[in-house]
Amino acid sequence: MKTKGNNVLVGIFCFGAIVLIIGFIVFTGGFSSFRGANERFVMVFHENVYGLHEGGKVTLNGVRIGRVERFFLGDATEDGPVPVLVEINRKLVRRHMVEGGNDLFDDEGFFKPAVLSRLQAKLIQESFVTGILYINLTNSTEVNVKKELYGFPEIPTNASIFAELSESINLEKLSKQISELMVTATQKLNDIDLNKLSLDFSKTNNEIQLFLTQISKAYSPLGPKLSDTVDEGKIAIGKITQLSESLKTILDPSSELRFGFTSTMRDISAMSKSLKSLADLLERNPQAFLRGKGETSE
């Protein structure tokens, strides 16, 4: 009798557990996919979807109405597009929808055609710490071109905030521009013929000094004021000569100025590349801002 009583208790416990499991599945809409009654859509994201998982949330203006069902990988590699199949749970929709006069859904919980033609999807970061992403649907004013992918209607997507930030800053373009500037500036400095420039300065200086000497001899009877003016002109010519020598020293390929300029431009180019790498890292793994890059597993 004791053994029989234990078997009855075990049976009741198992039956109750099965009822609870079935009730939970029905309550969360788990059987709806087997009935094929839910709407499914494909969305193509042209960015890294790290943090978006199978079973992840799909919301409409922040209200959960579905889940991520699966991903499609390997169809194309250009720009890394990632098609995502989502399921709209009609049980969740009907729980939250307004009965009668609903502008978004019909009485069965399906999107109205006019609304469906204006839906757009976007990746949203649920938590900056965990990096979890979900898909949020919004109703835009523009009418979308009707498309299908893998046999499901396609909903257009917008870039996430990290993709927009990376595109707006465009650090890769900035790095290329700085590199080109460095090459151009170095080339222009190298094109300067310092020897010819120095000879031209010296030749001009000698001719001016000769001219002033001739004037001084020819017009010395006019008085001391003219002689003083000629002497001041000679002093000015001497300063021009010093300036010529200084320019030759500064612009020389082995000068500290040329070396410092080239070194600075290279540092700026390296810095812009580092910023680009940082933006790419945060786009792929936003929580790295708090957790760090981490060690590479061997």
Image (cartoon, rainbow, N blue to C red):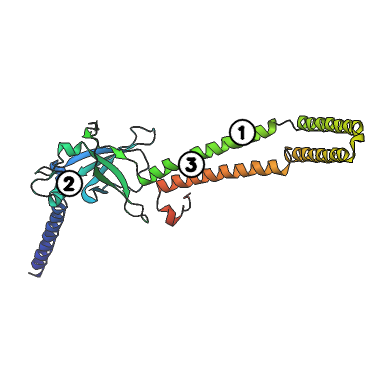
Question: Mark 2 highlights which residue?
Answer: 89
Q: Circle 3 sits in a helix, a strand or a loop, which is it?
A: helix
Hey, what amino acid is under mark 2?
Asn
Q: Position of residue 216 (x, y in %)?
A: 89, 34
Hey, what amino acid is under mark 3?
Leu
Residue 43 or residue 118, whichever sits in front: 118
Hey, what amino acid is under mark 1?
Thr
Residue 259 or residue 225, whichever sits in front: 225
Q: Quadrant of the N terminus?
A: bottom left
Q: Position of residue 169 (x, y in %)?
A: 45, 43
Q: N-terminal of the two: label 1 or label 2?
A: 2
Vertical placement of 266 versus 75: above or below? below
Image marks 1 and 2: residues in contact by CB distance under 8 Å: no
Mark 1–mark 2 distance (CA, rounded to whole Å): 60 Å
Could you classify mark 3 by the number of other residues whose Cα lies within 10 Å: few (under 14), some (14-19), or many (20 or more)? many
Mark 3–mark 2 distance (CA, rounded to whole Å): 41 Å
Which residue is pictured at 73% across the width and 30% down the height? 193
Q: Nearer the viewer, mark 3 or mark 1?
A: 1
Q: Circle 2 sits in a helix, a strand or a loop, which is it?
A: loop
Q: Nearer the viewer, mark 1 or mark 2?
A: 1
Q: N-terminal of the two: label 3 or label 2?
A: 2
Question: Mark 1 highlights which residue?
Answer: 184
Which residue is pictured at 61% across the width and 34% down the height? 183
Mark 3–mark 1 distance (CA, rounded to whole Å): 20 Å
Image marks 3 and 2: residues in contact by CB distance under 8 Å: no
